[in-house]
Image (tube, rainbow, N blue to C red):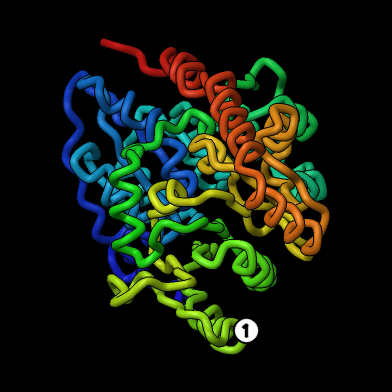
Amino acid sequence: MRRRGGYEEGFLTRFGIGLDLPSKRKNVLRIWIHAVSLGEMLAIEPMLMALARDPRNEIFLTTTTSTGFAEAKKRYSETLIGLAYFPLDFWPFSRIVWKKVMPDLAICAETEIWPEHLRQADRRGVPLILVNARLSDRSFRYAAKFARFTQKELACITEVLAGSRRDKDRFQALGVKENRILVTGNLKVDIDIQPILDSHAKTALKKELGLENGFILLGSGTWLAEERMLLKAFKRLRSDFPDSRLLIVPRHVERRDEIARFLSTDAEGLSIHFKKKGEPPKPVDILVADTNGELRILAQLADVAFIGKSLPPEDEGQTPIEACVLGIPTLFGPGMKNFPGIIDQLLRYRAAIQVSDEEEAITEILRLSRNPEVREEMSKAGLRWHKASRGAVEATLERIEPYLPRI
């Protein structure tokens, strides 16, 4: 928390202190939704807004990270009856918050399986639904290692709405009965990115950011080793396209000092600007987007995107969904464990390219930069994949509806 910063606002709500909610209204159902961080906060938006549009529902939202809290405050403040940090998962704190919220339905996103939270729902007879449910390799191994404990906690979940067949099989292997699991698809695929920039808006934004109109290579959710790779690719790219630019959107914005140190030595002779410092005074060679919640806008400026946390030693991967939904030719390394089903689909549609190592990543970036017709085909493939893969929000809402009894 100290390293990432931004936790001061609302910090005491983690202990159940200072949580101020309106009294429950007659014939209005209170829904408590929990989404851990920025990615999940964006993924639940269509579901949350659909539930909130019904005047018979009111939404209380919790999150864990400061970035998730900031994004929720920006997006949903006028929609919610309350926003807070999720309470520490110990009996006194969880009980205090449950007693104040008094939800009629609890919804958790993805892997948010907190034992005391589940027990509170079970004790109070409140249905708890896990939406967009997934288990990474690491989470599955950990849960299987403590199978007796895990089964007891998972028994408190009313229904698991899995993101993929693979996730369904894993929950079932951990003891969740098959009749309580349904594959509804990945909510993140159902995103509707707004605003979509037209050519004039893109040109204006590029000028504002100092990127001008050359070829733009994007590093999305990157870590240091991947940023080093991108810089190597960019230097070689410059020999073919002198007006090209490198746009880095790091995984954690608090890494800006680390990135600055690396660029100060390895990018000598290139102009560098960090977005948090404001508008650059002149065109730049490298822009580091050290701000939160802007990837969907900035990605629209890219000609090719590399997805981070996917080259060794990293192995979990960041989301490739936004880039492919926007029709941006996309590359990633072998480590994409967090998105197995989606990766298979993207490769099958030829909307993305998977590389084995740094050298192959650089080779593919250069190949794509020199072949606009290949980039165009990948762009169209990404749009086809998105159109064919939607439907998770509708399926999820359909399963939630029976848990919203109307008086």
Q: Nearer the viewer, residue 376 or 52?
A: 376
In the picture of the structure, the residue carrying the numbered disc 1 is 266
The percent position of residue 330, horizontal first and vertical second, equals 63, 45
Look at 72% across and 48% down and name the residue there.
336
Q: Residue at x 62, y 54 (%)?
A: 306
Quarter of the image with the C terminus in it: top left
**Along the horizontal axis of the image, is 281 left or right of 394?**
left
Q: Is residue 333 visible?
A: yes
* Direction from residue 147 to residue 24 in the image, left or right: left
The residue lying at 43 percent from left, 65 percent from top is 289
Looking at the image, is 46 positioned above or below residue 404? Answer: below
Residue 155 placement (x, y as % from top left)? 64, 31
- 338 vs 4: above or below: above
Query: In this picture, is 293 found above or below 167?
Result: below
Q: Label 1 crowding class (10 Å Cα cut-off): few <14, some 14-19, many 20+?
A: few
Label 1 residue SS: helix
In the displayed structure, 375 sits above or below 279; it is: above
Q: Nearer the viewer, residue 4 or 9?
A: 4
Residue in front for this viewpoint, 198 or 392? 198
Can see residue 115?
no
Q: Position of residue 30 (x, y in %)?
A: 29, 30
Q: How many marks?
A: 1
Nearer to us in this view, 185 or 117: 185
- Name which residue lies at 45% across and 56% down: 64
Q: Mark 1: which amino acid?
A: Asp
Q: Position of residue 37 (x, y in %)?
A: 47, 52
